[in-house]
Amino acid sequence: MSYKNCDIICFTLSRWDSFISSPALALAKEFAKNHRVFYVEHPYSWKDYYKEKNSPAIQNRKAALLKGKNIYTNPETLPANITIVTPKLTLPINFLPKGSLYETLSKKNDKVVLDAIRRTIKDFKLTNYVYINFFDPYFVRSLPADIKPLCSVYQSMDDISQVGYSNRHGTRLEEEIIRNFDITLCTSKELTRLKSPFNKNVFFHPNAADIDVFSKAVNETLPIPEEIKDITTPIIGYTGSIEYRSDFELLRKIAETHTDKTLVFVGPIQGSEVDEYGLKSLPNVRFIGSRKIDQLPPFLQRFDCVIIPFKKNTLTKSIYPLKINEYLAAGKPIIATHFSEDIYSFNDVAYVVDDHESFLTTIDQAIRENNEERVIARTKKAAQNTWTARVEQFWNILNRVKPV
């Protein structure tokens, strides 16, 4: 047996066609260069189904969700070695309190996922395989005796305890899965510290970037997106989800202080804070909405600087943001709040500031100081943080902890 020729089963919180950049999918694509990858999607619940039943995502999966038919797909946009596996619908149970009812229904949901995994193992004759759970501790916290991977790996990406919805059950479930799995990988140094008490094999394994995608913002002349063609001012840009991690007070201050610039957000809005802080009513703020990862470079190329305006709190202390390496690969001047030890490790190529006032004044400095030498330094830094490097690190960890 050898990891060199093994297959990989990924069970992941991120679906393959999500608008948000997904470390799980990025790693899956990198794994697929040398391995068959079976990407088992986070299940849709019956609640999800009725809420989104007319959406293309649901319609394209309808036969799999309702009848367990056509559960395998090979999307043209993904490497041929990746097979997407769609489990049937599950029960929505997060609202329930901890107790016997939750555990009973949780086992029913686990059976749905395990049925899809067992079917995949049988249909594709999998014998030597690694099982990876990418940040989805709500299902299958321990593998049954008949599912025998060469190694079981869990990846933790955020501090679940600091998010109300996730913390309801997620904190204790994540501790359980870490105790039961062979290895846990954590995307930040703080997470690595927090999870180490539950398993001796916990390792720092940070996010990276798809350099080939984002370097287009530096190396190619891209068409200006229609949504920002009319903007004649310098642009302060942000890509990614706008949600509970964002410092909305700071965002309001940026727009009100830099009235000679336009603040452009490319990503989904979650929660009500955007409306509560009146950001949509400001004349120099524009929300583009969700875009696929390969649609981001044309926006980034037009941005004069980019921001990571996260709050400084217990949650963000555990975050290594995916976007830092994406921004660097695009060569952009970055202004970020000093929310974690991991973000400060980039202070040689990014402006990491401690307070709102510094953030506001540094925007002009970052734009003014931008030059070819700094662009090269940023892209070199990003080149150290590729998914290829992360996969190499992954196999080194497995061979050290559980050689086969």
Image (spheres, helix red, strand yellow):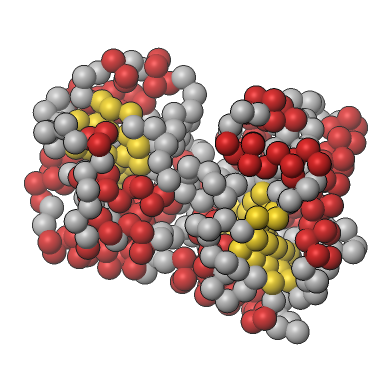
Left or right: residue 5 versus residue 294 is right
Residue 1 is drawn in which quadrant? bottom right
Q: Position of residue 379 (x, y in %)?
A: 27, 64
Which quadrant of the structure image shows residue 371?
bottom left
x 71%, y 42%: residue: 43
Identified at 84% across, 52% down, the residue is 115
Give the position of the C terminus as an image quadrant. Answer: bottom right
Lateral position of residue 57 relative to residue 129, left or right: left
- Residue 320 x %, y %: 45, 51
Relative vertical location of residue 292 with respect to residue 120 in this rendering, above or below: above
Q: Is residue 337 visible?
A: no
Name the residue nearer the viewer: 58 or 286: 58
The structure residue drawn at horizontal position 79% and vertical position 26%, both measured from the top left corner, is 97
Residue 133: x and y, percent? 68, 56
Locate residue 4: give its quadrant: bottom right
Name the residue at 11% across, 28% down. Answer: 260
